[in-house]
Image (spheres, rainbow, N blue to C red):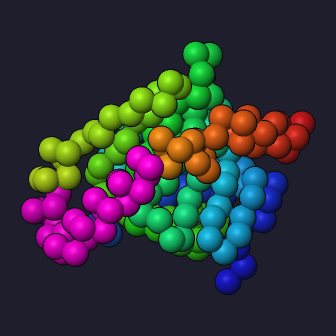
Amino acid sequence: MAGPQPGLPMQIKSYKHNGQLHRIWQETTVLKATSKRVIGANDKTLVTESDGRSWITREPAICFFYTKHWFNVISMLRNDGIHYYCNISSPFVYEGDAVKYIDYDLDVKVFPDMTYTLLDEDEYVIHRKEMNYPCVLDSILKNNIDELTYWIRQRKGPFSHDQVEQLYELFLTYRS
């Protein structure tokens, strides 16, 4: 199956471990795509929750998805700097003009000064029991949190402010 094409729109769909749809970002512009990574961008895009509620994102975001890592990274360009929201998730698949992944509850929030905090540990514990996450999954996710925090400390990949700003400039060329 062909992958996403730069300049074209795609959806982002997150699911829960039990297969239930969790959230859909309606339109994200593909900026770069390889067999291992897709980078997209959006601004003021419609997001629909599993319960039918919807909202619109407030700022431009550059989104990084990986086939080899159990996380994805959303870089949000705000007036006070770049904020990051990292979903601990399955690697993505691209199917039907959408990036799809399983959201595993845990999130890492990164501030412009590159300090960070792990979120939603209580939600993870509840869903791990409810959805019977396999024991090996717990180990995989913890190892990927370690890798993610290493990337943050090293300002690697999506945590390079220069790279995010260059990708935002590319996004603007597709919107004009």
Residue 124 falls left or right of residue 168: left
Examine the image and state in which quarter residue 137 appears: bottom left
Q: As drawn, which residue projects farthest toward the bottom?
A: 1
Q: As drawn, which residue projects farthest toward the front?
A: 154
Residue 171 falls left or right of residue 118: right
Position of residue 54 measured from the top left corner of the image (x, y, whole percent) = 45, 38
* In the depicted structure, whether residue 105 falls above or below residue 138: above
* In the depicted structure, whether residue 113 falls above or below residue 8: above
Position of residue 129 measured from the top left corner of the image (x, y, whole percent) = 10, 62
Q: Residue at x 58, y 16 (%)?
A: 80
Residue 74 falls left or right of residue 127: right
Q: Is residue 120 visible?
A: yes
Image quadrant where one finds the N terminus:
bottom right
Q: Residue at x 49, y 43 (%)?
A: 152
Q: Is residue 10 magenta?
A: no
Q: Residue at x 42, y 63 (%)?
A: 70
* Nearest to the observer: residue 163 or residue 172: 163
Q: Residue at x 16, y 61 (%)?
A: 128
Position of residue 175 measured from the top left corner of the image (x, y, whole percent) = 83, 39
Examine the image and state in which quarter residue 139 appears: bottom left
Q: Which residues are magenta?
A: 127-150
Image quadrant where one finds the C terminus:
top right
Position of residue 91 measured from the top left corner of the image (x, y, whole percent) = 47, 68
Q: Is residue 9 visible?
A: no
Q: As drawn, which residue projects farthest toward the top?
A: 80
Q: Is residue 142 magenta?
A: yes
Examine the image and state in which quarter residue 32 appears: bottom right
* Nearest to the observer: residue 139 or residue 130: 139
